[in-house]
Image: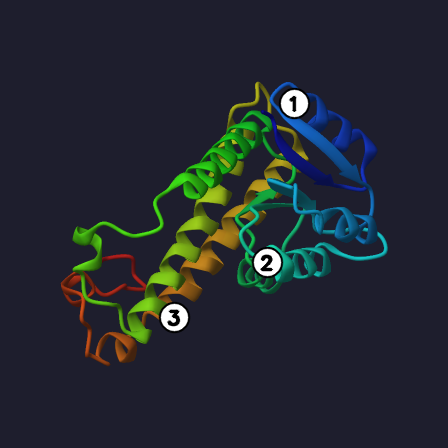
Amino acid sequence: MKKNILLVEDDPALRMVMREVLKDEFEIEEADNGLDGIDKGLKPENDLIILDYHLPKKDGLEVIEAIKKQFPNVPVIVLSGFLSPKSEAQFNDLGATKIFPKPFNYRNLLETVRSLTTRANQVEQAPACAPASMASHPPLSETERQMLTDSLNAVATLAEKIEYLQSVSEKYWIEPADISSMREAIRCMETEVQRFYGKMNNSLFNAGEFSSPLLTNINRPSLSGQN
C-alpha cells in the first residue's frame, strides 16, 4: 500500500516536477498555499509532508507549527530558497525532519522520502517495550540531553548543506547563480559550526555531573578546528 505524501508548494512548476518524481511510489495530495496546507496537513492519513517556507496566506513556520501540535510524529521536509540562521533554528525547534535548500537534487529528495516513510513504518511495528540491554543504561542528565540535541541539530543542518553542495557539483556546468548559492550555503555552514562551538564552550564541559562516560571523555570543540 502506497504511503500518502502532502506537497505544500505555491510554485506549480516545482509542484508538478515533485509530483512526477514521487507519484510512482506514493499517493500525492497538493496544496498551493499555507492555509490549505494546514487544512490538508491536519488529516491523519498523511505519512509525510513536503513544505515550502515562503507561502501565501500562511508561511511554512505557521503551517508546521499547526501540524506538529496535532501530529508531532509526522515527518516534515522543508524546502526553501533561502533560510536565515534564525528561521532555520525555528524550523528545527518546531520539529522539521529535513531542510532542503532550493535548488535541490530530486533524486536526493526521493531517497529521503523513501527513507523517512520506511523509518516511520518500522517505528510503528516496533515492540512497545525496549530490550533489557537498552534499559540498563543510566538516564542522561538535562545537560547531556541538551548537548545531544544541539549536536544532532548541528550535524543535521551541516548534512543538508553538504547534500545541496553535492547536488550542484553533480551538474555538467555551474551557473553564476549556483556559485552564489554555494557561497551562501558555505556561509550558513560556518555560522552553524560557530554557533555549535559557542554552545559547547568550556563552562558547559566544566559543569560536570555527567552520567555518561561517552560525554565525559569527548574532546572539547576548538574554534581553531584542532580538537
- SS of the residue under disc 2: helix
Q: Nearer the viewer, residue 193 or 35?
A: 35
Q: How far, Cα to Cα, is label 3 from label 2?
A: 20 Å
Numbered disc total: 3
Q: Residue at x 55, y 62 (%)?
A: 89
Q: How far, Cα to Cα, is label 2 from label 1?
A: 25 Å
Q: Position of residue 144 (x, y in %)?
A: 29, 69
Q: Is residue 72 above or below residue 186?
A: below
Q: Nearer the viewer, residue 141 or 39?
A: 39
Q: Position of residue 39 (x, y in %)?
A: 79, 51
Q: Residue at x 19, y 79 (%)?
A: 209
- SS of the residue under disc 1: helix
Badge 1 density bin: few <14, some 14–19, many ≥20, Cα 10 Å: some
Q: How far, Cα to Cα, is label 1 from label 3?
A: 40 Å
Who comes first in sequence, dot 3 or dot 2? 2
In which quadrant of the rendered image does the N terminus lie? top right
* Tag nearer the camera, 1 or 3: 1
Q: Residue at x 80, y 57 (%)?
A: 58
* Tag nearer the camera, 3 or 2: 2
Q: Which mark is residue 171?
A: none
Residue kind at label 1, given as amino acid type: Val
Badge 2 density bin: few <14, some 14–19, many ≥20, Cα 10 Å: many
Q: Is residue 162 left or right of residue 145?
A: right
- Residue identified by numbered label 2: 91
Q: Is residue 29 above or below residue 43?
A: above
- Residue identified by numbered label 1: 21
Residue kind at label 3, given as amino acid type: Gly
Q: Which mark is residue 198?
A: 3
Residue kind at label 2, given as amino acid type: Phe
